[in-house]
Image: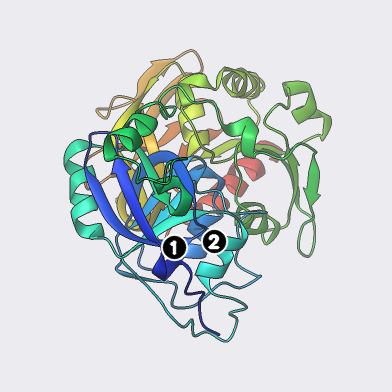
């Protein structure tokens, strides 16, 4: 199976909001798209990246030069669709090669209307984003580069359109990606516990990892109230990953505070970590260019162990690193830190059964160093039963 050659013949332009421009060829759908330019350092797992709801309204730049080698299958998507706003690669594979492949990545992007660009210097683009920070971006190809009069659109006009696009700071996006109806992921084997999972942009592998451990997971919409959470009689409550600015997530914060007050075992990941930070009274802030990829080093300060972990976040919790802090719910300490920049990567409540991490222990695609966190959640629930 070979990829479509349509994109290879169609010029495309990527325009950053600071005016930096890259010219290449269309990859995936032809047209135009806008979002926040971010880069992912994973060398594999592109299908899981594309279908991660946390990437909603982001244009993802792949730092690995060769993308699409294994095509696209029907087993690995993390959600019902591709969520990235745009896709940027250097050298797309011309012929996918994998026994599970059903179609090429180019074909999948085209079928889902995802506008991308290939053939640009992604190393230079990544360095630019590291130096200047994540910013708004537009990708234009085909008719988007031609005016109604048939003349080429000037770069200045494209730049003006990029600068009129919404920013990620202040964006409230969880409701756009979360389920609208509650559903249940049954336990695999003997049911041991019931967990209410608040979907802020959950990945499919997350409830699966819990189901593997005998947990029946009730996935609830982002709009779920505390009453909805406790209507399923949960042994524990989980808050998922998701897109957007945690400063906008007032509803999720209030629901989590209700859980903390009732001292129900609580576990949050990624956006859920930021929600826990806010619920405890800490602030959040936007990182310069964030952490994205499957090779980020994190230290578990409770054990001293260093893990290689999967990340996708542009915001972080502003909590003190030097010892426990007092909060309305008792003492809290920073349990995990990123070894690249000392960013808070986890919180541990010492007086109520609650903890969170900023990364993805379900690790699809890999690594699996942090899978023990699901077992730590089970230990909390076991402790409450005892």
Rendered location of residue 149, percent (x, y): 44, 41
Name the residue rendered at 44%, 72% in the picture.
68
The residue beneath circle 1 is: 27
Circle number at residue 109 = 2
Q: Is residue 95 visible?
A: yes
Rendered location of residue 213, percent (x, y): 67, 59
Tell me if label 1 and label 2 are in contact, CB under 8 Å: yes
Name the residue rendered at 44%, 63% in the picture.
27
The correct choice, above or below, for 160 with respect to 328 in the image is below
Q: Residue 171 or 111: which is nearer the viewer?
A: 111
Name the residue rendered at 47%, 50% in the picture.
143
Sequence order check, earlier mark of 1 and 2: 1
Q: Residue 357 or 46: which is nearer the viewer?
A: 46
Q: Residue 227 or 130: which is nearer the viewer?
A: 130
The correct choice, above or below, for 339 with respect to 330 in the image is below
Q: Secondary structure at mark 1?
A: strand
Badge 2: how crowded within 10 Å, few (<14), some, or many (20+)?
many
Name the residue rendered at 56%, 55% in the picture.
51
Q: Is residue 305 visible?
A: no
Alpha-carbon span between mark 1 and mark 2: 8 Å
Rendered location of residue 50, percent (x, y): 51, 56
Location of the C terminus by quadrant is top right
């Amino acid at each position: 199976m070979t990829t479509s050659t349509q994109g290879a013949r169609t010029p495309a332009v990527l325009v950053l909001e600071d005016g930096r421009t890259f010219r290449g060829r269309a990859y995936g759908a032809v047209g135009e798209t806008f979002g926040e330019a971010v880069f992912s350092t994973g060398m594999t797992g592109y299908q899981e990246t594309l279908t991660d709801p946390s990437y909603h309204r982001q244009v993802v730049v792949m730092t690995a030069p060769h993308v699409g080698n294994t095509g696209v299958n029907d087993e690995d998507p993390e959600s019902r669709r591709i969520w990235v706003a745009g896709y940027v690669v250097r050298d797309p594979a011309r012929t996918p090669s994998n026994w599970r492949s059903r179609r090429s990545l180019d074909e999948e992007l085209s079928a889902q209307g995802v506008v991308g660009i290939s053939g640009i210097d992604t190393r230079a683009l990544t360095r630019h984003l590291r130096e200047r920070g994540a910013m708004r971006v537009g990708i234009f190809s085909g008719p988007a580069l031609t005016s109604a009069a048939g003349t080429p659109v000037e770069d200045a006009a494209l730049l003006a359109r990029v600068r009129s696009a919404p920013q990620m700071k202040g964006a409230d996006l969880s409701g756009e990606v979360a389920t609208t109806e509650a559903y249940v992921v049954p336990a695999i084997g003997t049911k041991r516990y019931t967990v209410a999972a608040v979907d802020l942009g959950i990945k499919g592998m997350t409830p699966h990892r819990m189901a593997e451990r005998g947990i029946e997971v009730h996935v609830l919409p982002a709009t779920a109230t505390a009453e909805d959470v406790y209507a399923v009689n949960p042994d524990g409550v989980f808050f998922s990953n998701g897109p957007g600015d945690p400063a906008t997530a007032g509803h999720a914060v209030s629901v989590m505070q209700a859980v903390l007050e009732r001292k129900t075992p609580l576990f949050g990941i990624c956006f859920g970590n930021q929600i826990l930070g806010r619920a405890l009274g800490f602030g959040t802030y936007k990182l310069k260019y964030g952490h994205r990829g499957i090779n980020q080093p994190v230290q578990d300060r409770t054990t001293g162990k260093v893990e290689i972990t999967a990340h996708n976040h542009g915001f972080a919790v502003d909590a003190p690193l030097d010892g426990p802090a007092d909060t309305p719910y008792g003492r809290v300490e920073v349990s995990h830190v990123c070894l690249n920049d000392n960013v808070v990567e986890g919180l541990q409540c010492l007086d109520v059964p609650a903890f969170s991490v900023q990364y993805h222990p379900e690790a699809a695609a890999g690594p699996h160093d942090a899978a023990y966190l699901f077992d730590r959640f089970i230990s909390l629930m076991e402790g409450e039963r005892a």
